[in-house]
């Protein structure tokens, strides 16, 4: 029996409608009682002292750097230091041939002795003439002449003494000594060379490494905060730390000065800190991060930074209630220090907040038990104010 095309069309439409209805109709989930708790990681709100730091890039500078140069000419007989040696003020570094200067000193001493003998003779002659003048045996004019001669002889003795001092000084200059405490660098002249007092090349450069300074910069926006901290500290200098690129503390010192002007080209303020550097961890020319402690927040409430969720009404956190459900609570945030965030209002010490898994939560949701990680305090060497 031949089917009607109209009937076939109606059957096809009916079948398609049934299939579409089956796809779109919601499937009722099997009843399982209460919703399954959401697995999250928690953290505890803790109260602690939080240091706030201002950080800037700087470099280490030696307080004193001296190029040791010869002050007299001659052959360099010997070098009496090793490169990289720590020396003290007055240590012998090298010796220039002293023989010409010893001879010059002997000549100056001989001339001084000759002048002193002449002075002694003129003084005796003066006394003799003075006695004769007093008895009217000699004229006053002759006494005046001997007075002038005596003064000239005395001046010659003074000039001879100056020549002796100069010769002695030049002889002393043949021994090159360290003018400061510090570390010697690369030797610039070898023994056996002829050196002169006017040469540009020195013998060695000595750099003072204890103590050292760090010159660093901060943005001009930090000046107000820095100034208030300096005023609050009074005569006590602000603490400064020098750290490497990994945040490891290299040395601890204190603020020495704040520059008297802000660089208008870069908008930065220069600061200088000093470090004892007894263990030689800082080296002149080294780049470091200098961090200055401007404030310590006492008993500040802190939570892990990742606990904070941005919201339309401000940042909030999920707080765990006694029934293991969560509530969204808006909070006011303070500075971020390391991996922690300071909370000004909205939380109390000891409360539990969700640290990880907030994207799976909504207010009133039930959470699964999770091990609370032990809160870690921000280390002084790792904290920086932001």
Image (spheres, rainbow, N blue to C red):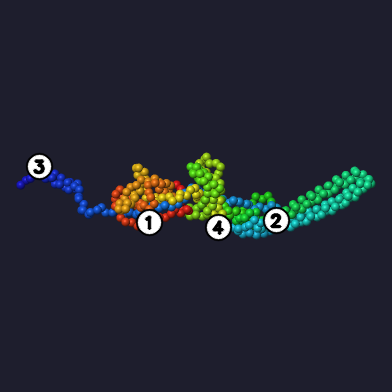
Please identify the quarter of the rendering in which residue 4 is found: top left
Q: Is residue 283 visible?
A: no
Q: Residues within 10 Å of mark 2 (few under 14, many from 20)?
A: many
Residue underneath mark 3: 6
Mark 4 or 2: the one toward you: 4
| Mark carried by residue 77 | none
231 vs 73: above or below: above
Marks 3 and 4, the one that precedes in the sequence: 3
Q: Judge left or right: residue 191 versus residue 372.
A: right
Marks 1 and 3, the one that precedes in the sequence: 3
Q: Residues within 10 Å of mark 1 (few under 14, many from 20)?
A: few
Marks 3 and 4, how far apart at CA: 101 Å
- Place of residue 177 in the rendered image (x, y in percent of width and height, measured from the top left): 66, 56
Marks 1 and 3, how far apart at CA: 72 Å
| Mark carried by residue 174 | 2
Name the residue located 58 percent from the left edge and 53 percent from the top edge. 211
Label 2 element class: loop
Name the residue located 32 percent from the left edge and 56 percent from the top edge. 369
Q: Is residue 218 or residue 224 the one in the foreground? A: 224
Q: Is residue 229 or residue 1 the one in the foreground? A: 229
Q: Are marks 3 and 4 in contact (CB under 8 Å)?
A: no
Name the residue located 31 percent from the left edge and 50 percent from the top edge. 326
Marks 2 and 1, how far apart at CA: 70 Å
Residue underneath mark 1: 373
Residue underneath mark 4: 279
- Place of residue 20 in the rendered image (x, y in percent of width and height, measured from the top left): 17, 46
Marks 4 and 2, the one that precedes in the sequence: 2
99 vs 315: above or below: below
């Amino acid at each position: 029996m031949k089917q009607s095309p109209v009937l076939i069309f109606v059957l096809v439409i009916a079948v398609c409608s049934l299939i579409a209805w089956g796809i779109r109709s919601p499937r009722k989930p099997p009843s399982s009682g209460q919703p399954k708790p959401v697995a999250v990681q928690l953290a505890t709100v803790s109260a602690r002292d939080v240091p706030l730091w201002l950080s800037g890039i700087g470099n280490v500078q030696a307080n004193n750097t001296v190029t040791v140069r010869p002050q007299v000419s001659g052959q360099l007989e010997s070098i009496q230091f090793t490169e990289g040696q720590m020396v003290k003020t007055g240590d012998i570094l090298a010796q220039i041939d002293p023989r010409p200067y010893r001879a010059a000193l002997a000549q100056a001493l001989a001339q001084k002795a000759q002048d002193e003998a002449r002075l002694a003779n003129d003084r005796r002659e003066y006394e003799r003439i003075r006695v004769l003048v007093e008895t009217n045996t000699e004229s006053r004019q002759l006494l005046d002449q001997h007075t002038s001669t005596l003064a000239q002889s005395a001046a010659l003795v003074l000039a001879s003494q100056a020549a002796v001092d100069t010769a002695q000084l030049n002889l002393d200059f043949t021994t090159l000594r360290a003018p400061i405490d510090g570390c010697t660098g690369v030797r610039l002249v070898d023994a056996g060379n002829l050196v002169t007092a006017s040469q540009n090349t020195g013998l060695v450069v000595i750099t003072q490494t204890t103590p050292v300074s760090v010159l660093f910069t901060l943005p001009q926006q930090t000046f107000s905060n820095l100034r208030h901290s300096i005023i609050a500290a009074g005569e006590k200098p602000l603490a400064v730390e020098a750290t490497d690129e990994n945040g490891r503390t290299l040395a601890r010192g204190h603020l020495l000065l704040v520059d008297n002007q802000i660089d208008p080209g870069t908008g930065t303020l220069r600061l200088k800190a000093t470090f004892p550097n007894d263990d030689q961890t800082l080296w002149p020319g080294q780049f470091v991060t200098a961090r200055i402690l401007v404030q310590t927040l006492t008993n500040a409430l802190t939570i892990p930074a990742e606990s904070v969720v941005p919201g339309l009404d401000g940042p909030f956190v999920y707080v765990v209630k006694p029934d293991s459900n969560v509530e969204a609570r808006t909070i006011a945030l303070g500075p971020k220090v390391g991996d922690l965030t300071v909370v000004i209002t909205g939380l109390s010490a000891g409360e539990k907040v969700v640290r990880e898994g907030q994207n799976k939560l909504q207010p009133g949701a039930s959470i699964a038990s999770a091990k609370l990680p032990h809160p870690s305090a921000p280390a002084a060497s790792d904290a920086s104010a932001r």
